[in-house]
Image (cartoon, helix red, strand yellow):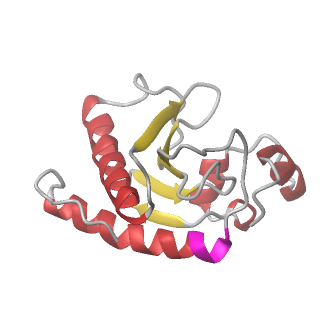
Amino acid sequence: MSAVTGWNEVSAAAGVAGACFVCELVAGNPDFAHHVAYRDAATIVFLNRFPWCEGHVLVAPVAHREHVVSDFSMEEFASLQRVLYAAGRALGEYVEADGLRVSVTGAAGHVHWHVKPGVADVSEGPVDVDDAAMASLAAKMRSRIRWLLAAGGASVPVVRR
């Protein structure tokens, strides 16, 4: 996966201009493949195909939702936030950082949260990250996210790996 091609170029090459990249990923379209770190019936966690830094993770609802709050019930939102928490905890254990940066993108597209390691040298655009390294990180995170969600997270000590 190249980290220098943008979504518009991928959509055009795949013949699905204007397609929702999260919905295409969820549907299994190989032109929109990402390394999935976690998925349940409501939420998906995956490494950004065009990362701004190593460990750039996206968390999104499986169902197409466009508005950050109003498209969710309180219970749905809280459930997604539990997964976001576990993804952030897992990411912090596997990628060297002095914290996490979390932002959300909503309206005019599939709402999703960006979770990035808080490092001083985060770029202002896509960077090349080795595909094998992204696959390995997704596999490690998958196991840890599942464990954190099962354990309830809050009482679980942070483990640096």
**Region rendered in magenta:** 130-134
Quarter where residue 95 is shown: bottom left
Q: Residue at x 62, y 77 (%)?
A: 132
Rendered-image quadrant of the C terminus: bottom left
Q: Is residue 161 left or right of residue 137?
A: left
> Farthest residue toward the left?
155
Is residue 131 shown in magenta?
A: yes
Q: Nearer the viewer, residue 95 or 149?
A: 95
Q: Residue at x 45, y 38 (%)?
A: 102
Q: Is residue 72 left or right of residue 104?
A: left
Rendered-image quadrant of the N terminus: bottom right
Q: Nearer the viewer, residue 110 or 128?
A: 128
Is residue 95 shown in magenta?
A: no
Question: Does residue 40 appear in the picture of this structure?
Answer: no
> Farthest residue toward the top?
70
Question: Does residue 133 appear in the picture of this structure?
Answer: yes
Residue 29 location (% of width, % of height):
69, 63
Q: Residue at x 83, y 44 (%)?
A: 8
Q: Is residue 18 left or right of residue 116?
A: right
Residue 44 location (% of width, % of height):
46, 55
Residue 63 location (% of width, % of height):
49, 45
Residue 154 location (% of width, % of height):
15, 50
